[in-house]
Image: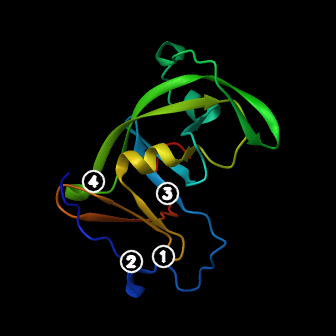
Amino acid sequence: MEDTPLIQFGRAERSCPQATHNGALVITAILANYEVERIFIDSGSSADILFGEAYDQMQLGDVSLEKVNTSLYGFVGELVHSRGMVSLSLTMGRGTTRKTCLLKFLVVDVPSTYNVILGRPTLYTFQAVISTYHIKIKFPTQREWEKYKAILSNPKGIT
């Protein structure tokens, strides 16, 4: 097993000193060549979720959906059936410290504030570590540990 660099979060890395621990870690990333905002990092989720409205905006069509017999619990306490599963590339980071991985997303038709929920499968695949105190996610790249902070901007793309 290869050595991975030591990961640390320093006091100077805190994105917003006034932020409280109540804020969600929400980022912008590249999903299937679309810049997608409002991606919620949820270490409590056992699945990666792509909400139907965002999926439809990407115009990937139902052809790319793999039919799966999977339902979810937890959205407002009721049973939610998925539309299917889709494999898409996700890129986090910028420039030489970006990382791209192929991930499987369940597509669900449920209203949401978010476009995507990245759960434990993504955190594992990216070897990512999150810090709610620093409002950051870090993951190893070929060059170094990428410090990918929560992005609260409004660039063009899926909003």
Give x and y (percent) for residue 104: 46, 32
How far is disc 1 from disc 2 in space, using C-alphas? 7 Å
Indicate the amino acid at tag 3.
Ile
Q: Secondary structure at mark 1?
A: loop
Q: Secondary structure at mark 2?
A: loop
Query: Looking at the image, which residue is at 53% across and 24% down?
Result: 85
**Which numbered circle lies on residue 9?**
2
Give x and y (percent) for residue 48: 54, 40
How far is disc 3 from disc 2 in space, using C-alphas? 18 Å
Indicate the amino acid at tag 1.
His
Upstream in the sequence, badge 1 or badge 2? 2
Query: Looking at the image, which residue is at 23% across and 66% down?
Result: 5
Q: Secondary structure at mark 4?
A: loop
Upstream in the sequence, badge 1 or badge 4? 4
Q: Nearer the viewer, residue 46 or 155?
A: 46
Task: Work out which residue is located at the far right of the displayed protein and give it.
Answer: 77
* CB atoms of marks 3 and 4 within 8 Å: no
Residue identified by numbered label 4 = 98
Q: Is residue 57 visible?
A: no
Residue identified by numbered label 3 = 27
Q: Nearer the viewer, residue 54 or 142?
A: 142
Q: Secondary structure at mark 3?
A: strand
Total marks in image: 4
* CB atoms of marks 1 and 2 within 8 Å: yes
